[in-house]
Amino acid sequence: MASKYLKSEQLPAFLESLAKNARVVAPFKRDGVTQYEPWQSGKDVELDVLLAKQSPKEYVFLQTETYLKFGYEMAPVPEGAEGEDAVPYETVKVDPQNEAPKQVIFGLRPCDVRGFVQMDQVFGGYGGFYFDPLYNARREATTLLAVTCREPRSTCFCTSVGGCPSSREGADVLFTQIEGGFFVEPITDKGEAIAEAAGAALTDPTDTQATEANEAKLASATKVDPAFDLEGVRDALHDNIADKRWADLAMRCVSCGTCTYVCPSCYCFSINDSIVETKGDRYRCWDNCFNPVYTEETSGHNPRAKKMNRFRNRFSHKFWYYPDKYDSLLCSGCGRCIANCPTRIDIREVIRVMGAPKEAPAASGAVAASAAAAAAVAAAADTTTEGKEA
Amino acid sequence: MSRQDHIREFAANALTEKRVDYFIGWKQGYNSSEMIPAFVTDPAEADQLVWNPLCHHNLVTFIKRNMPEPADAKVGLCVKGCDSRTLVALLQEGLVDKDRLYVVGVPCDGIVDRRKLEKMFSSEITEIEFPERGKVKVTTRAGETKELDQKDVELIGCAHCRYPNPLYSDNTAGPLEKEPDREETKPDWSALEQYESLSDDVKQALLEKIYATCIRCFACIHVCPVCVCWDKCVNRSRQPELVSQKVGPKENLLFQMVHMFHVAGRCPSCGACDRACPVEIPLGLLHAKMNKEIYDMFGFEPGVKLDEKPVFQVFDLKDQFGD
Ligand code: SF4
Ligand code: SF4
Ligand code: SF4
Ligand code: SF4
């Protein structure tokens, strides 16, 4: 599909045109904090701050989603009924809710997009598992307009997990900031439709602009520091499951769950009923594996009673259990969990230490040793029976 | 000998003498602009401990119920003035065992508000140095460098700190800081008073706006050193649903008010919740409100005297309940 050019001054008009048939969501700065919010005419999109505090996952995977309204009521007794048929009885009336308004998310980053791509597996029925109608309806109604990152943060590590600051994976359109505006690349049919609808706001780019965009992409990729070598990590996590260093690394974690709520790919939720008199809502809301009661059973037994068990689960889920089940990592390297953790638990460090084959020295900054070594260690290592549910 | 040297020496000695199983202090995080809690078990590693105005973490968090690993570990830790008050509050209630603690008091001259700094630069802060007492040198990823006066970028509570010197400790890291005249000066609640002067409608709108952004991550509650129920927290109860699990402005405010009431008389406004909140909700406002009411009604300041009972554990006919 042909690339386009959008002048910076034209951005508000472009968003305005999108807003005619969809809700537009974009990053905005409010009181110094950048977050994704519904766009309104006159609001300035914040594209200089990397990253918004949270990923925009909440617009597809709602933090609170009421998916059923229900009420108890007396069934009407049919006229002329006799005997048993005339005895009034109570019924439950259920009213499923599934709203999926059309929306366009502008200004999200390639790692944010990848969060959706990774989450899609779990909600999309991959491997014959559950297909979630609520998530998929909303995902279907959402168009993702990603923007190449210009100034990756020191905590970014997308390139270590197979991404890059200008990745097109999962995006419908990729915007790259160049002199005076954006180089615009529609990628999917949805993206193409957006470009067509924008009409005259988008012009044909010059060759110089195309070159400039390429240079910008290359430049930003070099600004992402390598964090670790992904090869062998999965096996090393498996082999290191009983390693004492998990407890050492978890010491300063307070088991809050902030890391999971700012993460673009964490997808856990719990289901609740809220009932007032005879009417109620059934809703789901985000939950996470750091919640001390996340795995608590009705008996009171908690298989992950200790902070360390919960800590180990998060990293193992992202780099071992999930990949085994869905053939995809559950981390896009955005680094939000590092920058927003109250004690700055650093996922890169955890993977460097626990994702390194057992005997290898795991000095901070070192990368995991070769896959061959990992395999050798795996063969010799003990196995444990830690549950791997997510 | 600097305070940092004292801390390192106390830590190394306590570990060598096996007085503690591990010692908690502060060390550098992923770059020099971030300090993080450090857990040291080997005396030879005590020299990674750091003391500077970025050491904001209240380490008392790590000795509250269910935190120490193993549960009966003997723990050494550093406390600043405000941190020590949360420790005293726990001790007053018998919620920690004094005999398993070794406490190094660190007299404090004020802590830098990193978020205040972040808002002064467009690029990410990657380096912070302290060339001399009272000066902060900030460098960004884009290479910009600025030198600032520490007093201009300190945490909200530091400017009127009443207890810069720890109120409970086994050893003190260096000379005491100058104490304010506590007879002359009352606690400072100017930020709260600004809020209190607003009309009801404005207050309502402001609270809704502030709490709308809460994501219920529980960082505030888990870092709060005097918030000790965590796995049994009423805010987590789904069956019965005592506090709605729905995330919305009113529900979030209620959730925070539960925290506020449960730490009233125990929270000395150490600010740990404020600093942990990823979306920067000024949680201190609610806690300041309780502290002000308790001070005005009972003349009580939480976590000050070891032998004092927490205000809500005493019944005194002479208590004055306002006019
Ligand atoms: S890693 Fe950090 S953000 Fe995550 S639960 Fe632990 S303390 Fe909270
Ligand atoms: S685990 Fe951390 S770095 Fe990876 S995607 Fe989630 S928040 Fe980003
Ligand atoms: S189990 Fe934990 S790490 Fe995995 S998706 Fe759920 S919250 Fe995220
Ligand atoms: S730390 Fe902030 S966002 Fe998290 S639960 Fe507390 S108030 Fe809400």
Image (cartoon, rainbow, N blue to C red):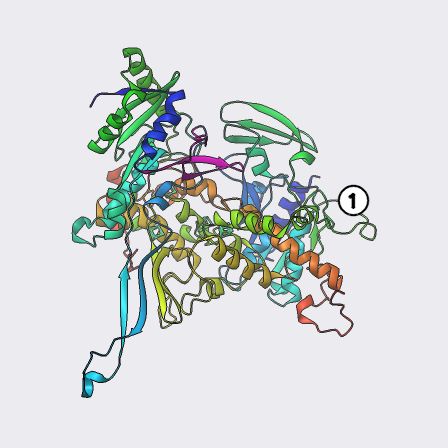
| Residue position marked by numbered label 1 in the rendering | B178
Side of B43 relative to B246 (left or right): right
Image quadrant containing the N terminus of chain B: top right
Which span of residues is magenta-colored?
A: A22-47
CA neighbours of label 1 inside 10 A, class few (<14), some (14 to 19), many (20+): few
Helix or strand or loop: what does disc 1 sit on? loop
Q: Is mark 1 within 8 Å of ligand 4?
A: no
Name the residue type under label 1: Lys
Front residue (pair B135, A386)? B135
The residue furthest front is: A80
Disc 1: host chain: B
Residue B164 to residue B2: above or below = below
Residue A58 spot, x, y in % from top left:
37, 46
Magenta span includes A26: yes
Residue A83 to residue B51: above or below = below
Residue A298 spot, x, y in % from top left:
35, 71
Residue A65 spot, x, y in % from top left:
34, 54
Magenta span includes A337: no
In which quarter of the view is residue A293 placed? Answer: bottom left
